[in-house]
Image (tube, helix red, strand yellow):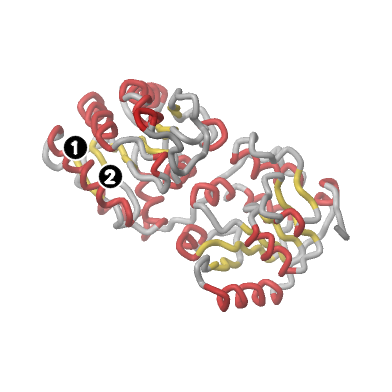
């Protein structure tokens, strides 16, 4: 392709307008946030924009290192695509980072006509044809958080400490305080949902682990989830209320914006969760996570740092990244059955023992 560049070129270019193409998903967006301070330091006078799915765009609103949030309507049809295409062309970007690497983001990158278009080695659906450079060391075996940080390294800022700034304000934190104020501390957040059925550890097992944590360490339980998780979260609430004293459980599922959710997660002491966007949001705001991994890899998809306990199933097809189980009969969703309560409970204990928020 005409205009190929090398990683070394990224250390010398002078970009006036920079665009990140990372429409989804929430967890990946959160893991990409540490790049924003790096881009601001590398291009202090540049206008920095981010293309993101409209439904999660709130997570970027008010970020101090971001000048423009460009919402993308994934299901908006031909006219929405045409508006997006024209909008990106008008913005006259110099540097575009396609960190999604799918056909739609490749088309977006192409539409910008930017002089420097950079992608990752995970690019697929022919999106790599729109890039002048695929940053080395960014294949699928590299953990996601490290893969995105390779961009910082290519820009010459890999020695910086990654910082995740989630742009909450006093209004979000005051709201969280009002929701949690009546609960006895410490607080355990529980997120039993996930988009893929193969990621959803049984809610009954969540209830057993959470109730043991509450009885052993004195936690109150804060149930979290999205608008589509009501069945799971209501079931979890009923199960916990059978074992815990009155007033020790609150269900906030479907009641938070993303920044309100971030404020809740910042306020709790530990989070027990499936592999999900809220898991990465909790880690991003500094809350220790007990993460349950079935069809995904804790190494490739888990948050960085030694404050977390990431517990994985041991079945042969673990970490296959299949959204639906390919097996039938007794092997159907065996990953969920094999991962027992005791291993996850050990993860909770290890996080409490090493943490500074809860007295073990």
- Residue 140: image x %, image y %? 64, 38
Question: Looking at the picture, does residue 51 appear above or below residue 291?
Answer: below
Secondary element type, mark 1 = helix
**Which residue does the image show at 44% across and 33% down from the upper left?**
294
Whether residue 177 is situated above or below residue 294 in the rendered picture:
below
Q: CA distance from mark 2 to mark 1?
A: 10 Å
* Closer to us: 301 or 50: 301
Task: Name the disc covering residue 223, or none.
Answer: 2
Q: Nearer the viewer, residue 231 or 166?
A: 231
Q: Residue at x 59, y 73 (%)?
A: 81
Left of 271 or right of it: where is 308?
right
Residue 174 can be seen in this image: no
Q: Which residue is mark 1?
A: 240
Side of 60 relative to 124 (left or right): left
Does dot 2 land on a helix, a strand or a loop? strand
Q: Within 10 angstroms of label 2, few (less than 14), some, or many (20 or more) residues?
A: many
Quarter placement of the N terminus? bottom right
Q: Are marks 2 and 1 in contact (CB under 8 Å)?
A: yes
- Image quadrant containing the C terminus: top left
């Amino acid at each position: 392709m005409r205009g190929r560049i090398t990683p070394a070129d990224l250390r010398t270019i002078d970009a006036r307008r920079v665009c990140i193409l990372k429409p989804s998903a929430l967890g990946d967006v959160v893991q990409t946030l540490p790049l924003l301070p790096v881009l601001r330091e590398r291009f202090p006078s540049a206008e920095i924009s981010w293309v993101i799915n409209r439904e999660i765009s709130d997570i970027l609103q008010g970020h101090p290192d971001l000048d423009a949030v460009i919402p993308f309507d994934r299901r908006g049809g031909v006219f929405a695509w045409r508006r997006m295409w024209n909008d990106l062309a008008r913005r006259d970007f110099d540097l575009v980072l396609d960190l999604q690497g799918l056909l739609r983001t490749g088309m977006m990158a192409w539409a910008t006509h930017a002089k420097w278009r950079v992608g990752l080695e995970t690019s697929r659906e022919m999106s790599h044809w729109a890039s002048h450079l695929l940053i080395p060391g960014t294949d699928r075996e590299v953990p996601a958080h490290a893969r995105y940080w390779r961009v910082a390294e290519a820009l010459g800022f890999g020695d910086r400490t990654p910082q995740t700034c989630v742009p909450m304000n006093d209004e979000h934190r005051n709201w969280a305080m009002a929701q949690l104020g009546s609960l006895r501390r410490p607080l355990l957040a529980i997120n039993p949902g996930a988009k893929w059925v193969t990621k959803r550890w049984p809610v009954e097992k969540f209830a057993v682990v959470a109730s043991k944590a509450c009885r052993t360490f004195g936690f109150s339980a804060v149930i979290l989830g999205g608008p589509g998780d009501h069945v799971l979260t209501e079931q979890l609430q009923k199960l916990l209320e059978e074992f815990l004293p009155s007033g020790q459980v609150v269900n906030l599922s479907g009641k938070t914006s993303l920044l309100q959710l971030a404020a809740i997660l910042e306020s709790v002491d530990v989070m027990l969760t499936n592999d999900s966007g809220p898991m990465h949001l909790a880690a991003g705001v500094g809350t220790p996570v007990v993460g349950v991994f079935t069809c995904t890899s804790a190494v490739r998809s888990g948050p960085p740092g030694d404050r977390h306990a990431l517990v994985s199933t041991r079945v042969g097809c673990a970490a296959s990244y299949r959204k639906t189980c390919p097996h039938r009969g007794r092997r159907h969703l065996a990953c969920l059955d094999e991962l027992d309560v005791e291993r996850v409970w050990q993860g909770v204990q290890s996080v409490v023992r090493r943490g500074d928020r809860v007295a073990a």
